[in-house]
Image (cartoon, rainbow, N blue to C red):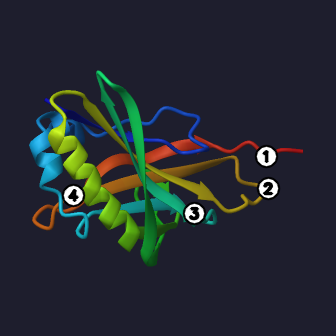
């Protein structure tokens, strides 16, 4: 049975981020049949990035790594910006969160077509494992930024909302020069 694992791979991810327990429970029983029933037109990714950092949404993609006894294959699906919104900072009694920019992304038309073809390939496999990742680059960081928070969410079905993959993972920023 093909198993589903959720992984965030970011070019600048240098620190460990915790995956919420609810996410682990959500995907614990996710398998080949669940993957095949995904409607790629509905699939969405959402990224929250601390201000003033900006994601380079032109480089955003969903990747799928399929590992079987035949070897490993990687499939990449370009993501398009659907919506960009500002999230105001939140000040609480014990803490304060930075303002964020929220990017909601969907598969491009070509990616939808390729995703459907990939579902057929996976349907024909007897065993193996699947790893999803959402990747994006970032625009140039302001020199005073040394760490940013990044959250990633994934929506696989119309019926269910977004599942938190990573919640405010801290990324260390290293400036060159």
Residue plotted at (27% across, 63% down)? 43
The disc, 1 or 3, on the residue closer to the chain's N-terminal end is 3
Indicate which label's residue lies in the foreground, 1 or 2: 1
Q: Which residue is mark 1?
A: 175
- In 3D space, how far apart are the residues under numbered discs 3 and 4 (Cα atoms)? 22 Å
Front-lying residue, 64 or 175: 64
- Image coords of residue 141 (percent x, y): 72, 58
Label 1–label 2 contact, CB within 8 A: yes
As drawn, 85 above or below 152:
below
* SS at mark 1 in the image: loop
What separation in Å lies between label 1 and label 3 (alpha carbons)? 17 Å
Identify which residue is drawn at 48% across, 32% down. 16
Q: Quadrant of the C terminus?
A: top right
Dot 3 or dot 4: first in sequence order is 3
Residue 107 seen: no
**Disc 1 and disc 2: Cα gap in Å?**
7 Å
Q: Residues within 10 Å of mark 1 (few under 14, many from 20)?
A: few
Q: Which residue is mark 3?
A: 55
Choose between 144 and 77: the one closer to the eye: 77
Which residue carries the number 2 mark? 143
Mark 2 residue element = loop
Q: Nearer the viewer, mark 4 or mark 2?
A: 4
Give residue 106's position: percent from left, percent from top: 36, 69
Q: Quadrant of the N terminus?
A: top left
Q: Which label belongs to residue 156?
A: 4
> Residue 32, image x and y in percent?
15, 40
Q: Is residue 117 above or below residue 108?
A: above
């Amino acid at each position: 049975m093909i198993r589903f694992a959720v992984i965030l791979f970011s070019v600048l991810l240098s620190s460990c981020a915790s995956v919420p327990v609810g996410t682990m429970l959500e995907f614990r029983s996710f398998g080949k049949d669940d993957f095949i029933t995904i409607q790629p037109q509905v699939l969405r990714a959402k990224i929250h990035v601390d201000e003033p950092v900006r994601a380079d949404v032109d480089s955003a993609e969903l990747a799928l790594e399929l590992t079987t006894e035949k070897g490993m294959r990687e499939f990449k699906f370009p993501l398009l910006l659907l919506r960009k919104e500002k999230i105001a900072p939140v000040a609480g009694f014990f803490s304060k969160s930075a303002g964020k920019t929220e990017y909601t992304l969907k598969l491009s038309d070509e990616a939808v077509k390729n995703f459907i073809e990939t579902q057929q390939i996976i349907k024909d496999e007897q065993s193996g494992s699947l790893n999803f990742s959402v990747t994006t680059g970032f625009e140039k960081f302001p020199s005073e930024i040394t760490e940013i928070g990044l959250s990633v969410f994934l929506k696989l079905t119309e019926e269910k909302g977004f599942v938190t993959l990573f919640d405010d993972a801290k990324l260390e920023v290293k400036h060159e020069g």
